[in-house]
Image (tube, helix red, strand yellow):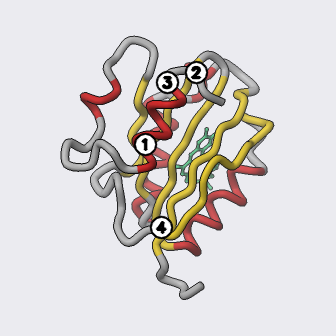
């Protein structure tokens, strides 16, 4: 796979501490700064004690981040839901947007021009209780 191939990956995991205690402004600022460096974009959401994250970017960056995520003790039981090469980003303007599914209409947050792409559909399925 050429180094600059764009990849999109989706996984679920179980939080080891309260999701609200992980997804703080401090946490988001830090991961967004990292993601800007590695050209990662995507979405992070949660339901009960579970996370769902979509990460997209150059395959080397995505692989690197996923390897880091697998070792992060703040979550466990990581399940890869989807991993594919993509022609373009689905969330080009999100340096890792945290989308709360609890009380908001997710579709309001999804990029308007791309509501039916796979990442968005995966997020919506997660919201409905899948995984
Ligand atoms: C649910 C979850 C999502 C995360 N998402 C990202 C991410 O998008 N980008 C990132 O760099 N780190 C993310 N992290 C944190 C990484 O696992 C790791 O702690 C971090 O990249 C290390 O960065 P540092 O070397 O700046 O401390 C996430 C952690 C958790 C638990």
Disc number for residue 129: 2
Mark 2 → mark 1, Cα distance in angstroms = 28 Å
Local crowd size for mark 3, using a 10 Å CA cut-off: few (<14), some (14–19), many (≥20): some
Residue 129: x and y in percent read: 58, 21
> Do the CB atoms of the residues marked 3 and 2 lie less than 8 Å apart?
yes
Observer-side mark, 2 or 4, equals: 2
Q: Is residue 63 left or right of residue 107?
A: right
Residue 8: x and y in percent read: 50, 60
Along the line of sight, the residue nearer the viewer: 6 or 62: 6
Q: Mark 1: which secondary structure? A: helix
Hey, which residue is sitting farthest front in the picture? Answer: 116
Which residue matches tag 4?
A: 38
Q: Mark 2: which secondary structure? A: loop
The image quarter in which residue 39 lies: bottom left
User: Is the N terminus in the top left, top right, bottom left or bottom right quadrant?
Assistant: bottom right
Q: Residue at x 64, y 66 (%)?
A: 64
Q: Is 23 located above or below residue 57 in the figure? A: above
Q: Mark 3: which secondary structure? A: helix
Which residue matches tag 1?
A: 29
């Amino acid at each position: 796979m050429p180094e600059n191939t764009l990849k999109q990956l989706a996984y679920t995991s179980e939080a080891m501490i309260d999701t609200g205690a992980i997804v703080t402004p401090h946490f988001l600022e830090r991961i967004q700064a990292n993601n800007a460096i590695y050209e990662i974009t995507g979405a992070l959401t949660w339901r009960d004690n579970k996370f769902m994250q979509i990460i997209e970017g150059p395959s080397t960056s995505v692989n690197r981040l996923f390897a880091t995520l697998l070792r992060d003790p703040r979550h466990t039981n990581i399940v890869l839901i989807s991993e594919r090469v993509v022609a373009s980003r689905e969330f080009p303007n999100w340096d890792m947007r945290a989308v709360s599914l609890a009380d908001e209409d997710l579709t309001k947050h999804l990029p308007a021009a791309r509501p039916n792409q796979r990442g968005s559909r995966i997020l919506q399925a997660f919201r409905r209780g899948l995984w």
